[in-house]
Amino acid sequence: MVSKSYSNLLELASGEAPSFGRMRRRIPRIMTVAGIISDLDDDPADSVCSDPSSSSVQRDRIIIVANQLPIRAQRKSDNSKGWIFSWDENSLLLQLKDGLGDDDIEVIYVGCLKEEIHVNEQDEVSQILLDTFKCVPTFLPPDLFSRYYHGFCKQQLWPLFHYMLPLSPDLGGRFNRSLWQAYVSVNKIFADRIMEVINPEDDFVWVHDYHLMVLPTFLRKRFNRVKLGFFLHSPFPSSEIYKTLPIREEILRALLNSDLIGFHTFDYARHFLSCCSRMLGLTYESKRGYIGLEYYGRTVSIKILPVGIHMGQLQSVLSLPGTEAKVSELIKQFHDQGKVMLLGVDDMDIFKGISLKLLAMEQLLIQHPEWQGKVVLVQIANPARGRGKDVKEVQAETYSTVERINQTFGKPGYDPVVLIDEPLKFYERIAYYVVAECCLVTAVRDGSEPSSPKKSMLVVSEFIGCSPSLSGAIRVNPWNIDAVSDAMDSALEMADQEKQLRHEKHYRYVSTHDVGYWARSFLQDLERTCREHVRQRCWGIGFGLSFRVVALDPNFKKLSMEHIVSAYKRTTTRAILLDYDGTLMPQASIDKSPNSKTIDILNSLCRDKNNMVFLVSAKSRKTLAEWFSPCENLGIAAEHGYFFRLRRDEEWETCIPVADCGWKQIAEPVMKLYTETTDGSTIEDKETALVWSYEDADPDFGSCQAKELLDHLESVLANEPVTVKSGQNLVEVKPQGVNKGLVAKRLLSTMQEREMLPDFVLCVGDDRSDEDMFEVIISSMAGPSIAPRAEVFACTVGRKPSKAKYYLDDTVEIVRLMQGLACVADQMVPV
């Protein structure tokens, strides 16, 4: 039994999936090594593809994963055992395949069937679907499916993603950990099914929608280099809503195990990026038009493009005899009777705004009585995908509102609202689109795609996913009943020429941005994002849903204590450069002053006359001189190297001529202005620099203000001899030419002047400012300032892209390493 304190779902995420019924025969897995099929489990140590390797025969193949397969299943009519399967022509997944239009691309589907298949039939059904349709069915026990789909997906994720908070028990959707565990279990079962057919070096995997948001973690855990895309077909809520989800970080980290994440609109993408910033501390940037997040050395790309419609399918359906007959029937029913049809097509869902549309229709008939007897709203209500109290309430409200409107405004032979709540065939729906004069979409939140092929007007909610793309539509706030009513009247009264121009504008966009364009664009971006996989070295770290992959340069290694101690013992003249904040001292520490252990380590290293040890910091020289006063032989560089001294008893020098700091009179008032308007920000006034920090401010607002401040300062200081730079939660103004690389150059040149050619160089730092030191050290290896065949160690803190060749995980490991070197130094110095 799973405990309630199951916060990271370690057992569930890393153990075997629950076994249900008897064991099924597995579908043959594609082999990546000839003749060998390895057993794969969820241990990070067993992750596949941790090093680049050549793949087998190259094949263009896409595995499309979704909650439901694009398959219709029907029992054979003769009461015998067996099923009849056919493609579901209305499925987006099938339209996606048709849209690709490339016979060279093989598509395999993984998902559930709508119908329940008895366990005794599952093997046979699996084989039929794989052989005939290239579909891999995922069979779930009814109870598990109910808790996963109707429970967690529909009662918790779906409402939350549509901005409905469970503020009271009556609203439903309160977080239930057992439903979450069912969701994770199902995602793992999906991963197991994918394992049976994937060729990890060659195949692309495209996961669809919120039902499978933690699936990327299970796939990435099995195959570090899996080429994985995810597209969210629903809205992504703002951070204020999303952060109420107790498992918010688990879902974010799982999505970030994808290579490419797609959204309908920039708003949804922006909300996701804001959540990553606020909850995980990640930042994003745009490079050549592509938005990317750096996540442990991997670039996770963001794609923004709404799903299009299948133009080929629409055109073929329009020419069917059945469609033409239905169109003729509807023309006789409405147009020939002098009536104008308004059309709405929505799921019977709380978020689709059917009741708001009906109220707007009622308002139209009240405010514009001339339309009474003439205008008819046909509302096609598709069956609800979920179930529960909210669905019943929507149905009851819809039926009662329709009845009230028809009783109030209806006449013999005229009902102002026609509600169709039974399933319609696709060609019948198309016929309604053809005849309608205006299509109404009043969803309060939705990820919808456009669906009207006719030269009718569109009135669309500004909250739906396709709204930004349909610039010729009349956009409305569905909550403003009067505005929707006025929009309906405007659409009906609009001149034919204006309608035609708007229609042509829509048609150009819809026909060029169809489902094929969307699919090809997404896969092209996925391929572009995955190109770097083969050049990177990958490690899987973390357990359960905290698992992630670190991708680094193949030459990037962890610095081992044995290796550096051995090198230290073999060498005689040593140069040691150490950053302070974030290296010897954790960034999160409130008290930044060194403890006695740090002082002892530095003194032990400095005691050897053949060692030159330099501490490099952004702190002021006064602070550093006070903190490190017990270290007589320690060299110190303050304010990124502007001030430095080689020993405690020597005078401070400057790396460049003393600059005039008159520019501070210009910069400081500007910084004060931003400090007053940015709660949590501060100004640090150093001797030669000014730093504006927003570490304690709202991350989104602070970042936005930092960008504005950077532009403002660059403008007002354009003629001053200073550099304006942004760093981690700060904006800094300092003299031109000052960086930590100058300290490294000065140390090496001083040692060269004293004929102390170092054969051991250690340089340790944690952030971007330390990269200048790494660059100088590495570039000097072939020069005269370092001995030939010297042992050079440029080491960064944390596994991340860096010019350094080595890394250690955190400050604890750095201190442990320095303590080891200090012990060796004490042994080697004669008493």
Image (cartoon, helix red, strand yellow):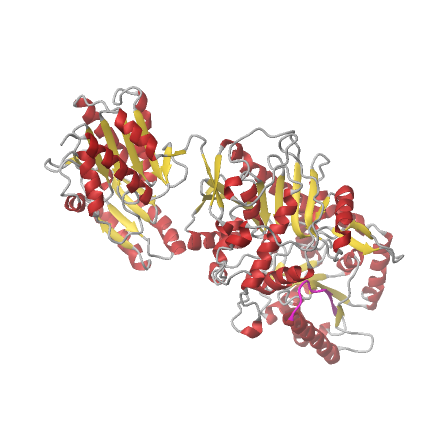
Q: Residue at x 42, y 55 (%)?
A: 278
In the image, residue 43 lies in the stretch drawn in magenta: no
Q: Looking at the picture, does residue 104 appear above or below residue 522?
A: above
Quarter of the image with the N terminus in it? bottom right
Please state the horizontal and vertical placement of residue 785, each as a whole percent of the image.
25, 22
Q: Is residue 95 toward the left or the right of residue 210 in the image?
A: right
Quarter of the image with the C terminus in it? top left
**Residue found at the very far left of the displayed protein:** 649
Please state the horizontal and vertical placement of residue 352, each as a whole percent of the image.
64, 64
Q: Is residue 183 toward the left or the right of residue 101 in the image?
A: left
> Is residue 296 something that shows in the picture?
yes
Question: In this orientation, which residue lies closer to the viewer: 819 or 472?
Answer: 819
Q: Looking at the picture, does residue 242 appear above or below residue 794?
A: below
Please state the horizontal and vertical placement of residue 800, each as a whole percent of the image.
41, 39
Q: Which quadrant would residue 475 be assigned to in this image?
A: bottom right
Read off the magenta span. Answer: 376-388
**Residue found at the very far right of the displayed protein:** 78
Please state the horizontal and vertical placement of residue 349, each as a whole percent of the image.
65, 66
Question: In this orientation, which residue lies closer to the viewer: 638 or 766?
Answer: 766
> Is residue 476 something that shows in the picture?
no
Question: In this orientation, which residue lies closer to the viewer: 823 or 544?
Answer: 823
Report the label total: 0
Q: Residue at x 21, y 29 (%)?
A: 747
Q: Residue at x 27, y 21 (%)?
A: 787
Q: Looking at the picture, does residue 496 appear above or below residue 164?
A: above
